[in-house]
Amino acid sequence: MAVAPNTQDLTGIETPRTTFGRGSFLQREGPLAALFMIPGWAILLLFMAYPFFLGIYISLTNKRLGRSAYDFIGFDNYRYLWGDSIFQQTLKNTAIYGVGTVPFKLAFGLALALLLNRQFRFSRVFRAGLLLPWIVPTALSSLAFLMLFNSVISPISISLQQAGLIENNINFLGTAWNARISLCVANIWRGVPFFAITILAGLQAVPTELNEAAALDGANRWQRFWAVTWPIIKPITLIATLFSVIWTISDFQLVYVLTKGGPANATHVFGTLAYQRGLNATYFGEAAAISLYMFPALALGAVLLLRNIRREPH
Amino acid sequence: MTDPKVDGLIAEARTLRYSRRQVMRRAAALGLSVPAVTAAMTTSGYAAPNQTRKFASAPAFLQGSSIHILGASYFVVAGEERFREQMAEFGEQNGVDVTLDLVAWPDLQARIAAAIQAQDGVDIVQLWDPWPYLYAENLVDVNDIAVPHGEAHGGFYDWVVKTASVDGSWHSIPYGTSSSAFAYRTSHFAEVGYDSFPDTWEDLFAAGKALKEAGLPPLGQALGHSLGDPPSFTYPYMWAYGAMEVEEDGSTVAFNTPEFVEGMATFIQGWEDAFDTTGTAWDDSTNNTAFLAGELSATLNGSSIYISAGRPEADGGVPEIYEDMNHADFPQGPAGRFTNIGAQSWGVTTFAQDVDAARSFLDFFYGEDQLVSWYNANGGYYIPAASSFSELPVYTEDPKLAPFLNLVNYGRNKGFAGPSDEAAALAYSEYIVIDTFARAVGDGDAQGAVEWGAEQLERVYSR
């Protein structure tokens, strides 16, 4: 390819010019950037925006599985759900599931990250091992918990019985609160590594000198964490929390495998109820509305949180 | 030299289009030798209708096709093995590639839904009652296979027609059902003074209480979100205490009745006294495991527990339980004795890659020899849909299995007293009746649970 004499761009750096010439379409930053972004945009539109907007549209219709005819019904599905006691129960369950897991995942994750941030023998092995619950497919770990929480042949119950601590099998998944607590425990186990690894990455960015300087100034361990470490890891911790809230609220696999929303709907979350109403009962419109019910609140929360993080002085 | 009586029978069979089985039954009635009749059928070239099709070479219109079958997992291993053999046999005869995907019972509906939404992926699908109503638009008309099949075998039972046909039309072909009877340990019940299985629900709860108090294994019942065992208990119990989902008009909810609230209060007490209370978390397989492990004295189930117990020990059989166990009819309540019975069936999807190939497979499977071999392999687990099959030795030889065939005499469809229609299917899919019981034992509030169930049924039946 013939190369034209070099020219200077706005940065003052000389760049070789092609035979397209100064006015070439591809020489201009705007169109070129747009061109480079097309694949990304295409993926976003095809795999995220399209299903999302289709979901919104379906939630505003009475579409049913396998039926070609359906009508636009506005917000009827949302209104209908608001008065449905199973949906109300699902809202409560989801709130319990979120409140019962995210703070614990954050606390355990933070503690674990602080622990693993220290250098000790095999620290790298421990760091890698920490990821195990996170990288094991959820369906698989859920099945493991299903076995642990089995009503008849749970290894936990059997061990405790053999130790003489209990007489009967523990009804892990058979009463409302036992089932909720069991689900929270499994969710925390699976979610802690995400917090720990994310916060650990943030901790790696905390300059050692700052901590040393604070220590020389007489700050104790707690003061150093609060005044030096926390401000630096706060943004990443908040973002991890935001992700965790979203993932917890939209959880499906764990709940489906362990309880399928039972007993008596005591553990239904949005995902499992949408599955039941959409795939089993064939009401796709209603299922879409269930899935999207929390979207406005979550979106608002995410926007406020992210704006707050951006505004904070670094 | 031929026997004129045999010749006469063959002539009669030609006129009346007897199936092979009908010929044999007639031969038995006339006192003729079965081998002689069989030989005469062969030499005369009589081809009984609904026999397995045997092609000299694979039909050209099927060759190269493929069929993907979606069904629920088997509880009787030999039944699954036989089905796979039949797939292979059909595939070999016709040059068709037949594959099978078996999923857990609670997941079957979701898989069907996914296929329907994608309009792809499944050619033949297994259906529970009353799902044909839900998916009728996506199932091809199979009247031409189902009607002659039923007629050739004494006709389908009423409960089959009510629960598997869609307004009298067949969109799937019924084969029967895996309904439940009470499996119980005779020695345990005898130990607490019951020489036979209790005949009323209250007696059963009293027996269960005595079992528990004597340190014997309790009764076991699943009340989780599952499609098999939980409805097998909850629907009959509801009917036994005078309630039903709807009246005969199919829309007036008749669930919240004082008799049923009282019956529910009895059940709440019975649950504490007589059952393993972890049943609220059980699925369809938990009671099988528990019974075979000797952890239960009685449970509602298909004959799969008995069949599993009777296998060789090396294959997981439990001889002492097999010998000790028996089956019993459902107990009765103040309103009578009831069970829930609904037909399972196979349908061809409208979006099947090759509808003709899929239909041909079902034609093959429902051929008398094939279907009988499948019923036999399942050891009586599936109650047949057509009456003549009920006379098969697999159903009559073992008296311990008699309660399963008796179910047809007191069975009701889901949605009774209304039809087994789409609303009944929805109520079933949303576990409404099951959750009513689970709520009741969860918080001990019989009235509140029944009111909740009635409210949910109103929601479903008013849509």
Image (spheres, coloured by chain):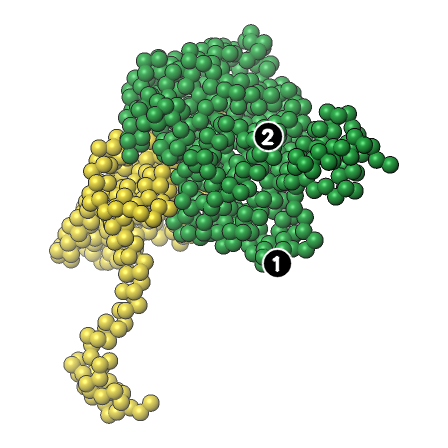
The spot of residue B129 in percent (x, y) is 45, 33
| Chain at tag 2 | B
Q: Quadrant of residue A77?
A: top left
Q: In front of the other: label 1 or label 2?
A: 2
Look at the image and tell me in which quarter the C terminus of chain B lies: top left
The spot of residue B36 in percent (x, y) is 80, 34
Q: Nearer the viewer, residue A67 or A158?
A: A67
Task: Residue type at mark 2: give it.
Answer: Gly
Q: How many marks?
A: 2
- Residue A12 in view of the camera: yes
Identify the residue at image location x=22%, y=44%.
Answer: A73
Identify the residue at image location x=65%, y=28%.
Answer: B392
Q: Quadrant of residue A138?
A: top left
Residue found farthest to the top:
B193
Mark 1 lies on residue: B60
Q: Residues within 10 Å of mark 2 (few under 14, many from 20)?
A: some
Q: Quadrant of residue A263?
A: top left
